[in-house]
Amino acid sequence: MTTDSPHIQRLKQAGCRLTQARLTVLAVLEAEHGHITSADVLDGVERVNPAIGRASVFRTLDLFTQLGIIRPTYIDTSLTPTYVMMRDGHHHHVICTECKRFFEFDDCGMEALTRNLEETLDIRISGHLLEFYGLCAACQT
């Protein structure tokens, strides 16, 4: 992970210190491309640096969520979120409700809606998470 990564730049812009815990959690999230549960983040951080405690990991996940670096997503009615990385302030995927696989896609077609919302509501939109649910081809059979 380089110090010019957009996520590190976001931390710096927000005035956050680049602590070992934050950098380690970020590295674990980036290694998994952001589709990861908090339990998986804890396991990954433990492998990299066992000195980082659970409370630090959860505080870091909360901070990253507040800053829009990650967003929690909930499959079905699960109480445990899966965190997704917000590349360039947005993320799009379809989740199979049977096997729980994520299918990412790039073009969400939300540009016109974003502009309309910004003009209508006089707000500057900094990102979005677009999530669809359905059955993948393998689970349909």
Image (cartoon, rainbow, N blue to C red):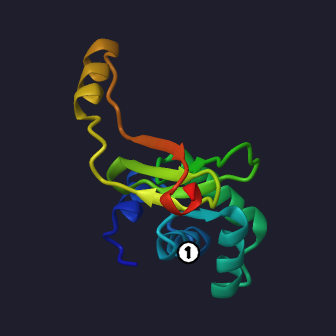
Q: Residue at x 76, y 47 (%)?
A: 79
Q: Which residue is labeled 1 in the image?
A: 28
Q: Say which amino acid is labelled 1.
A: Val
Q: Residue at x 31, y 16 (%)?
A: 122
Residue 110 or residue 31, whichever sits in front: 110
Residue 125 or residue 59, whichever sits in front: 125
| Above-or-below relation of 10 to 34 | above
Q: Quadrant of residue 98?
A: bottom right
Residue 135 or residue 121, whichever sits in front: 135
Tally of marks: 1
Q: Quadrant of residue 10?
A: bottom left
Q: Residue 115: percent from the left, percent from the top? A: 24, 26
User: Is 139 situated left or right of 130 in this image?
Assistant: right
Q: Residue 33: percent from the left, percent from the top? A: 47, 69
- Considering the image in quadrants, where does the N terminus appear? bottom left
Q: Residue 63: percent from the left, percent from the top? A: 58, 52
User: Is 80 situated left or right of 89 in this image?
Assistant: right
| Above-or-below relation of 105 to 35 | above
| Above-or-below relation of 8 to 10 | below
Q: Residue at x 25, y 17 (%)?
A: 119
- Considering the image in quadrants, where does the C terminus appear? bottom right
| Above-or-below relation of 138 to 68 | below
User: Is 133 situated left or right of 129 in this image?
Assistant: right
Q: Residue at x 68, y 56 (%)?
A: 59
